[in-house]
Amino acid sequence: MSLIFFNFYRVYLLLLGILFTLIFFFTSPVCADPKVYSPIVKKGERAFEYRGNTTVDDDDNKDGSQRHVVELEYGVTDWWHTAVFGRWNKPATGSLGYALTAWENIFQLTPKGKYWLDAGIYLEYKLADDDDDSDQFEGKLLFEKRINNYQNLLNLTIEQDLEAKGDDDLVFEYAWRTRKKIADHMKVGFEAFGKLGELGDLKGLEDQEHRIGPVFYHEFHIGSLEIEYDLAWLIGLTDPTPDNTFRWKIEIPF
């Protein structure tokens, strides 16, 4: 029985790997990196993560864009998580190329579950690969609240182009997640993302980017190896937003 179980998951992992490979090579990165962060830090946790997304739209200028991120992360203490990652972009009408290297840090501000709301901050420095592109700094406020069996996360993001002056290019974005466990190692939920524009000149609603959609989360084990992945379909709610964004993530702690 255990041999059959092992062989099943070996085939399952192979099919999952084929799926991610097909997505990487045959989908045509997206303007934003849709990921929701928790303020909770786990000391000693190490992981490799690959995530990406691609868009589908009738407009050629929004169809087929991609983003791919490869990341290594580590929980240094029970309040500080750090990671480095590389990112590849493919504009809708361009080709895939290396875009930047980044260093991200999460600082947990409140003990988990002690207060009404768990909170943290996220700080990230992006070093552009192309000399013609500017480096960027990104900061997020991270919030988590559990209500009954639902986990709710909210990220409020400010991104600054380091060559800009004042509040020029100081862009405001948000991300939201609600999910619930439906079985052992399996959860479902939804995520929402938005980009409202520069703080000094926020766009009207019809000119902002907003998308929302269902997400499936799953984790499984092969021996002592734990593998987590999730798949999302995000639907654009405004005209500047691609009609469909397909997002995936796979994480392997080690």
Image: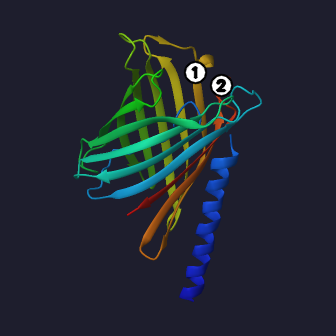
- Front one among 234 and 8: 8
Q: Is residue 226 above or below residue 128?
A: below
- Front one among 109 and 96: 96
* Residue at 75% from the left image edge and 27% from the top image edge: 59
Report which quarter residue 107 is drawn in.
Answer: top left
Callout 2: few (<14), some (14-19), or many (20+) C-alpha neighbours within 10 Å?
some
- Front one among 25 and 172: 25
Query: Which percent across, then down, holds residue 44?
Result: 27, 59
Q: Is residue 93 shown left or right of residue 220? A: right
* Residue at 61% from the left image edge and 77% from the top image edge: 8
Q: Amino acid at mark 2?
A: Thr
Residue 37 in view (yes/no): no
**Mark 1 sits on what residue?**
208
**Mark 2 sits on what residue?**
238
Report which quarter residue 47 is drawn in.
Answer: bottom left
* Tag 2–tag 1 contact (CB < 8 Å): yes
Query: Which percent across, then down, holds residue 129?
Result: 45, 31
- Front one among 97 and 168: 97
SS label for mark 1 = loop
